[in-house]
Image (cartoon, rainbow, N blue to C red):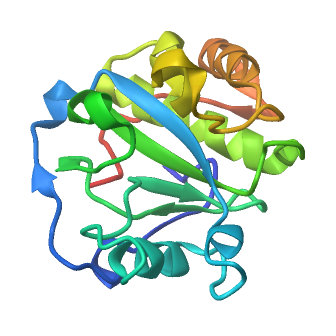
Amino acid sequence: MTDPYPCQQIVDDLRRRRPWKRRSVSKIVRVVVHRCDINVASKGRMGNDPYSCSAWFAGPDMRWPGHPYHFDVDPMGKVWQTNDLDRLCWGAKFWNAGALHIRVEGDFRVVPCPPVQRAAVAMLCCDLLGNLGLGPSAVVGHSELSPHGYKRCPGDAFEVQELRKLVLMSMAGSVAGVPWRPRHEAWWR
């Protein structure tokens, strides 16, 4: 079966300080959507691609093990797998043990997510949820997990409730004219 969106595994290609700890994939109960604009965070010193993201988080400014998200979706809808699903990445403090993290490239505090990018995020969520046996309510924005709403992630212009509706419609029928079918075997690692 062909992928409904382009996906590239770059897990082994990214810069890391050290590996993330492992956990059982059966522990995953939610998919957390984040926004992250590395070009803004690095004050223009880096690009916004997954390689720059990994270098930023593993570099001297952050000193994390590496890229803190499992998937990265660019504005053109291209998807990269950046960590194995059994890796316990730091993306949402107390919620990490049961979370997969998707980085949606961009700054959605004011500017909305491009439709092609939103469709790719929805299809990725459908694929993950279907293979993990979870429903659309398992998709959450990072700010929904933050106490007292101190986070603005994925941003006010990225409507997570609308994404959940799109995921629900996708799982029930189709999105952007591309029918969604659960895969018999997972394509990620």
Instruction: Tell me the quadrant of the picture where the C terminus can be found.
Output: bottom left
Write down the quadrant of residue 185 in the picture: top left
Write down the quadrant of residue 134 in the picture: top left
Residue pictured at 89% horizontal, 46% vertical = 111
Q: Is residue 57 above or below residue 86?
A: below
Residue pictured at 65% horizontal, 39% vertical = 154
Q: Nearer the viewer, residue 181 or 77?
A: 77
Q: Is residue 3 above or below residue 151?
A: below
Position in image of residue 172 (x %, y %): 63, 11
Residue pictured at 26% horizontal, 48% vertical = 85
Q: Of all residues shown, which one is farthest toward the bottom?
A: 45
Q: Is residue 182 left or right of residue 84?
A: right
Position in image of residue 138 (x %, y %): 45, 17
Q: Of all residues shown, which one is farthest toward the right?
A: 111
Residue pictured at 58% horizontal, 34% vertical = 151
Q: How many marks?
A: 0
Position in image of residue 171 (x %, y %): 59, 18
Q: Nearer the viewer, residue 128 or 68?
A: 68
Q: Nearer the viewer, residue 39 or 175?
A: 39
Position in image of residue 181 (x %, y %): 53, 29
Q: Is residue 88 above or below residue 153?
A: below
Q: Is residue 173 left or right of residue 19?
A: right
Q: Is residue 104 above or below residue 150?
A: below
